[in-house]
Amino acid sequence: MNIKDVIILGAGASKSEGAPLQNELFKEFFEYYKQVLKGKVWSLSKKQEKLIVEYFKKFWGIDIENFQNRDVKFPTFEECLGALDLAYHRGESFKGYSKEKIEQIRNALIFLIAKVLDEKLRGKIIHHRKLVDRLKNEESLKQTAFLSLNYDIIIDNVLVDLYEEFHLDYGIDLINFERRSDWKRPDKNKAVLLLKIHGSLNWLYCPTCNHIELTPKEKGAIKAFYKVEKCTECKTPMEPVIIPPTFYKEMTNPFIQKVFLKADKVLRSAERVFVCGYSFPDADLHIKYLLKRAEQFREETPEIYVINNHPNKTDQQKDEEKQEICKFFKNKEKIHYTNLSFEKFAEKGVENV
């Protein structure tokens, strides 16, 4: 596989299709939950609802049943999950919160990510489709690898729709290939690589058989929160594969490790890296690590194009973000901090930058 370009898709890319950013997740969910979802079958269970209401009230002083959207500043997802994860990794608990209860709250919060994305991304996919269409027309799609940091399946579904011409390759073996005769492994001559280093809403993992099942075009992880999906071979409950946005990322899943190693290899050989809708948050040191490994292996910085603009971003924010990104890399002149939004990049590329 001759990969020349890597496109990193952050939350800002999904934002262009209607997904909330990480710091918007709680407000988005709780507003929508109160108005539409409360009490419905495919929403929080009563137990989950009670746990989350209590958690926000006792930990953060927020009454999510009565808050006014404009007046309340929620903690970030990193803070909410980070506090729970740190207690878990230290083998500690909080007063009134056992280890079991902490784990239950943590699972409910991860569910929120999945549910918000499920609800917000039901419209027509526009910009990711334009991106793939442009690359296809430029005859560069097979030389491009996508590194998605998102759980949603926006880019997945766009690539799946090109099945006759291109085959989606997640960089891992799926049990679907062995179970169904109509499933064929990606043809190397048609393969388009999509590496989802934080997991995916359409992956389910069996920890006993040690395999991943793909739920094509569906968010199987959402269903797994409501109903136990059992492995057809050993009857073990299948688990969602979602690495939540915290400082303490648990990346021991063997398939996530394979994706990580594949991303490492691809970035080492790439000539250009396009960073879309992503500002290198501190919690994602592993992404910086991959880029630094690539830089050191090549003994030079690859051409990096940062596509992270939006109408509300001030010049001061741009300058600060540019400085933060540039300081991490050795060859500063190789960092092209553009004024492009993801929408513009998807349509036009960077040739005029």
Image (spheres, rainbow, N blue to C red):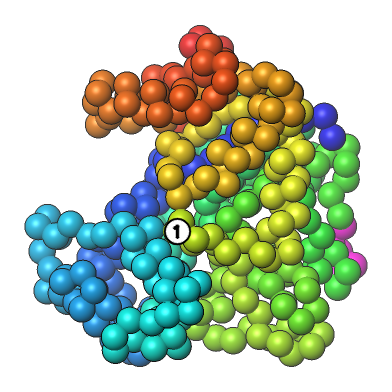
Q: Amino acid at mark 1?
A: Thr
From this view, report whether residue 289 is shown above or below residue 210.
above
Task: Please name the residue that numbered disc 1 is placed on.
Answer: 246
Quadrant of residue 242 within the rendered picture: bottom right
x and y percentages locating residue 120 in the rendered image: 39, 57
Kindly report the secondary structure that dominates the magenta region of the rendered protein: loop
Q: Residue at x 78, y 74 (%)?
A: 210
Q: Which residues are magenta?
A: 180-184
Query: Does the rendering let one see residue 201?
Result: no
**Residue 315 vs residue 298: left or right?**
left
x and y percentages locating residue 211 in the rendered image: 77, 71
Query: Does the rendering let one see residue 47?
Result: yes
Q: Quadrant of the N terminus?
A: top right
Q: Nearer the viewer, residue 143 or 124?
A: 143
x and y percentages locating residue 96 in the rendered image: 29, 89
**Residue 70 vs residue 95: left or right?**
left
Q: Residue at x 57, y 64 (%)?
A: 250
From this view, report whether residue 41 is shown above or below residue 218.
below
Q: Residue at x 69, y 31 (%)?
A: 294
From this view, report whether residue 342 is shown above or below residue 112.
above
**Residue 233 vs residue 259: left or right?**
right
